[in-house]
Image (cartoon, rainbow, N blue to C red):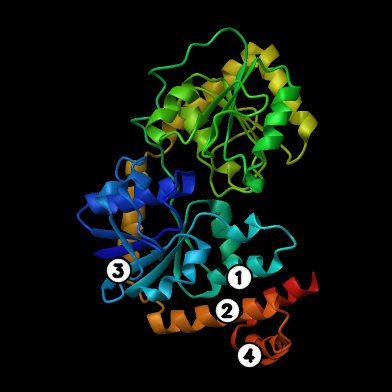
Amino acid sequence: MKCIFTLGSPAIGGGTNVIFEHASKMAKEGEDVYIVTDRKIEPEEYAWHTSAHLLKWVTYDDIKDEEFDMAIATWWRTVYELYRVKSKRYVYFVQSIESKFYKDNEQGVKMLAEMTYMLDMKVITEATWIKEYLAKYGVDAYLVHNGIRKDIFILEGDTYKKGKGLRVLVEGPVDVDFKNVPKTIDLVKQSDADEIWLLTSSKIDSYPGVDKVFSQVPPVDCAKIYRSCDVIVKLSYIEGMFGPPLEMFHCGGTAIVYDVTGHDEYIEHNKNGLVVKTDDDDKVVEYINKLKQDSKLLNRLKKGAIATAKSWVSWEESSMNFYKTVKKLNEMPSVTQEVLETKSKFFFDVYVKYETKDLSIKRFVGRRLRTNHPRIYKFYRKIIRK
């Protein structure tokens, strides 16, 4: 099978790691697997992943005369470029409901992201909540849970020296609003925690109030950091199925999280971690203090986390499930390149008219949109009423 994945950026990050794991597994199984991007990517940009070099890296211009068996979009923005790839089949790998990444005053972009679910592509997703969300668009998505590198994230191994007291790890980029890292650090600072460490994809050397910063660390080196901390406090507002708490579980620690989408795939309150209602900041501080004061509670949650980790799938298993799903979809009918191009350009035109307040949009909504795309029409009417 000649398969190509779209990619927004090769920069180190959880979502990109998931794509590389699945794509490289297919390459190891003997498939011809490509990654397509807008610009030429240098090998050092993806060297942080141990298997990304197995993939064939190309730009859209490089492949304009090639044909693929399957093209897989991996980010909503790349969906609108997917028709540029000549392929027999088109699939959408949805890692989150990405319209949620944008603020309420960005309704046009939110609408454009939502409309990607109406392009009649087969869909694979990683979390139960996403599968349920997509069902409202009539999409019956295939569910493949993310895995864990069981050879990296293990209980035994190198650690950084640790004294007495509670060491808290905060994880995430400091400049992405929905990851909520600055506020998380502030809350930990308000607690009785003895040390605050930050593991971030942001390129920084230090951060106010943080004792130690680890920046742009390859996954293979993260386990040492996790094993050296007691608890990860991750208070994202939006997630697909976040990996860092699960990686922490595999390394012997526990977690404090908001009741964010996807947390319930593996986090059980008071069993392997502590779950807080989103923005209940006092409770976050209270829980951190409890873990410092009550070693029995901390150890019980750590034991529960280890038990959860033992039963979770490895990347080998997860990516094999993804591969089997792709092979199954390769036998099914698919939206054509021509139809995908027509719909993509139409949806984008709706977005442009909305953003530019083009009065002809009334004709789109009143006639073409309502008649030809009733699901989009209903969604659009919600947007313009806000």
Q: Residue furthest top?
A: 164
State which mark lies toward you, 2 or 4.
2
x and y, in percent, of residue 268 in the image: 60, 34
Where is 179 relative to 350, above or below?
A: above
Q: Position of residue 171 (x, y in %)?
A: 57, 34
Closer to the chain start, of discs 3 and 1, is: 3
Which residue in the structure is indicated by mark 2?
347
Left or right position of 171 against 104: left
Neighbourhood count class around disc 1 (C-alpha, 10 Å): few under 14, some 14–19, many 20 upward = many
Q: Residue at x 49, y 60 (%)?
A: 75
Pick out the residue farthest to the left. Answer: 30
Q: Residue at x 50, y 54 (%)?
A: 95
Name the front one of labels 3 and 4: 3
Q: Which residue is mark 3?
A: 62
The kind of residue tagged 2 is Phe
* Relative vertical location of residue 22 with respect to residue 269 in this rendering, above or below: below
Alpha carbon of mark 3 to alpha carbon of mark 4: how far? 36 Å
- Image quadrant assignment for residue 354: bottom right
- Quadrant containing the N terminus is bottom left
- The residue pinned by badge 4 equals 368
Disc nearest the viewer among 3 and 2: 3
Q: CA distance from mark 2 to mark 4?
A: 11 Å
Q: Are marks 1 and 2 in contact (CB under 8 Å)?
A: yes
Query: Which label was assigned to residue 112?
Result: 1
Q: CA distance from mark 1 to mark 2?
A: 7 Å
**Mark 3: which secondary structure?**
loop
